Image: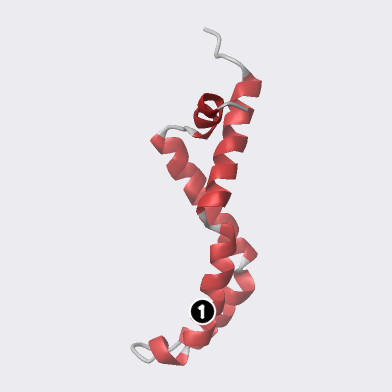
Amino acid sequence: MGYIQEARENHVKKKVEEALRSKMKQKALKQCEEYASKYAQCASGRTLSVVWQCRKQAKELNECLHQYTNDAVLEEMKREYTLQQDAKGPLRA
């Protein structure tokens, strides 16, 4: 695949990219639900102490979320979106 074709596949409108980012974050939260729950339980009833008392849970949650919310994942989602749009073909009036 040439550079121009690859660049075209990875280019999406800003609103589409924002929607894909939102979808990526929702998927990540669902995948990391166990860690989010542990962090929420730790944080429950705390204010400032949550920073040091829940450090381990926060780190685990962030590590999990990062697996599903990074540039590589977003680029793959953009590529899939572009391929789906190309498969639909041009809009007809």
- Residue 40 visible to an observer of this rendering: no
The picture places residue 75, in percent across and down from the top left corner, at 54, 44
Q: Nearer the viewer, residue 22 or 80?
A: 80
Residue drawn at x 35%, y 87% as measured from the top left: 47
| Amino acid marked by disc 1 | Lys
Residue 50: image location, x then y, percent: 41, 87
Residue drawn at x 52%, y 7% is 93
Q: Secondary structure at mark 1?
A: helix
Judge whether residue 55 can be spotted in this image. Answer: yes
8 on left or right of 84: left
Q: Is residue 12 above or below residue 34?
A: above
Location of residue 57 in the rendering, given as x and y in whole percent from the top left corner: 53, 83
Residue picked out by circle 1: 59
- Quadrant hosting residue 53: bottom left
Q: Nearer the viewer, residue 92 or 17?
A: 17
The spot of residue 38 in percent (x, y) is 58, 81
Q: Residue furthest top?
A: 93
Relative placement, left or right, of 45 versus 64 is left
